[in-house]
Structures are given as C-alpha cells and as structure tokens.
Image: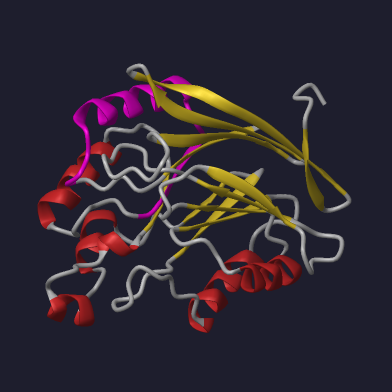
Amino acid sequence: MRIIAHISDLHFGAVRGDLVRNLRESLLEHAPHVVAISGDLTQRARSRQFAEATSFLSSLPFPLLTVPGNHDIPLYNIYRRWTKPLAGYRRAVGDAATFYENGEVALVGLDTTKPFGWKEGRFSRRRLGRLATILERVPETDIRIVVAHHPLPSHKLAALTRTHRIDMVLTGHHHVGRHDVLAETLGTRSCLTIHAGTAVSHRLRGQDNSFNILRVERNRVDLELMLWCDGCFEAAEKHRFVRERGSWRKVEDMRA
C-alpha cells in the first residue's frame, strides 16, 4: 500500500496562516509516501509568493510532485505572461518534480496552463505526447496516476485511458473536493478522477478548506476527504473504490 497526499490551490499570497500550520501538522501525521500538488501554488505568481510556497514545501520531509496552475502565471505583467509565463514557477520549483515512481505507483505531472485565456486549461498534442512517452516507460504493474491542475476533458481522458492505461487523475482548480469514475466510451476500462479543494486559501467556493489522503493498492483505493472543521483537518468523508477487470467501482461497505 502507498499513501498519497493530494493538495491543491494553495494560493500563497491569499492564505490563512493557521491553515498552513495545521496542513503541515496533518501531513506529518499521515506520513505519505509522496505529496502531489495540483497547481496554483501562488495567488499572483509574484516572487514573494513563490518564496512562501517554496518555504512551505521544503518544510515537508516527503517526496513532492508539483504542476503549475493558472495562478502561477503572471496576470498583470503581459510581457512576462507572453514570453516567459512559467519563469517564476520554474525558478521556485524547477522541472525535476514532475515524475514519481516507487514500484507500486507512478505519478506523472501534466502542465495544463496557457498564457492567455488562462482560466481554461490547454491540452495540446505536444504535452499529451510527452505524457504518453513517459507513461510508456512506466511498469505495467504500477498504478498510473496523472496529476494536472485543470480537469481533463472527458474525451481526451478517455483516449489516454484506452491507449496508455491511466488508472487515476488528480486535479484541482475548482476549489471543491469531489470524485468521479469515468466509464463512458472506455469499454472494459475506467478511470478514477479525484479533485482536491483549496487547502489553505481564503478563496472558498462553497466548501471549507480541504485536501485528500489516498491509500492505494493494486485494485483498491481508499479516499479520505480531509476537511477543515473546528480548528483542524478531519476526515469528513471516506470512500472506497475497487477495480475488477480493469473497471473501478465505488463500494458502500468500507470493509469490502
């Protein structure tokens, strides 16, 4: 079994300090094998905000996988947004933290940002081709997980699932924790999609701050939605998914 902490939409520059401290404490308590951060490290892609995000991430004694979000691109500096949209992000995070594999699970980061029309994601052939190349090198026995900021369009996700056996996608962007099983048009395969809320920002959209803890086995995933409640993060929801003949299904009995 591997434990994955899935956090998203940190938005340093628009955070609550008590949430940042409690998030770190909760992550230390869960001791995940890897932390996946699905974008929006900052609020406005400013150097000080990246420094704050980097300081927090470097305080975590776990492997990290990060991808950029639309807020990690400058909004008001049009020249930088056009010529070097991710320069600040890359200086802070680098390009090395986009792949993680440990013999049981493989996480691959997918950059979905675009300089203009920046709220929407971009899923170009070049980026998806690079993702496919990485997935070709992943052992067949691994659970294959894609991490992206924007949720993938269902038709692109269906194609990737068919051709490269994607088992799960972790995303953010909407500031609401939820999950789905994409089964349409996939034949005998399905893909589990898990979305994280905003972990520490005050920019809420109808749900309190949250993040996800996943306990992943070959044919089973246990998902805990860790929700901010009464001064700490608590497991507000628990869900189990099992895979049979390549298809995920949600089970009501957690003992199954």
Name the residue at 56% across, 44% down: 178
| Residue 100 pos. (x, y %) | 51, 50
Q: Closest to the observer: 150 or 61? A: 150
Relative height, residue 54 to residue 188 (above, below) = above
Name the residue at 45% across, 28% down: 227
Is 27 one of the magenta-colored residues? yes
Name the residue at 23% across, 25% down: 18
Q: Which residue is the extreme one toward the front?
A: 206
Quarter of the rendering occupied by the C terminus? top right
Q: How is the image coloured?
A: secondary structure
Relative height, residue 105 to residue 81 (above, below) = above
Relative height, residue 73 to residue 209 (above, below) = below
Q: Closest to the observer: 103 or 3? A: 3
Name the residue at 32% across, 64% down: 70
Is 224 one of the magenta-colored residues? no
Q: Which residue is the extreme one toward the top?
A: 230
- In the drawing, does residue 131 fall left or right of residue 15? right
Q: Closest to the observer: 188 or 56? A: 188
Segment colored magenta: 13-39
| Residue 80 pos. (x, y %) | 16, 76
Quarter of the rendering occupied by the N terminus? top right
Q: Quadrant of residue 72?
A: bottom left
| Residue 48 pos. (x, y %) | 10, 50
Q: Quadrant of residue 23?
A: top left
Across the whole image, how many numbered discs are drawn on residues? 0
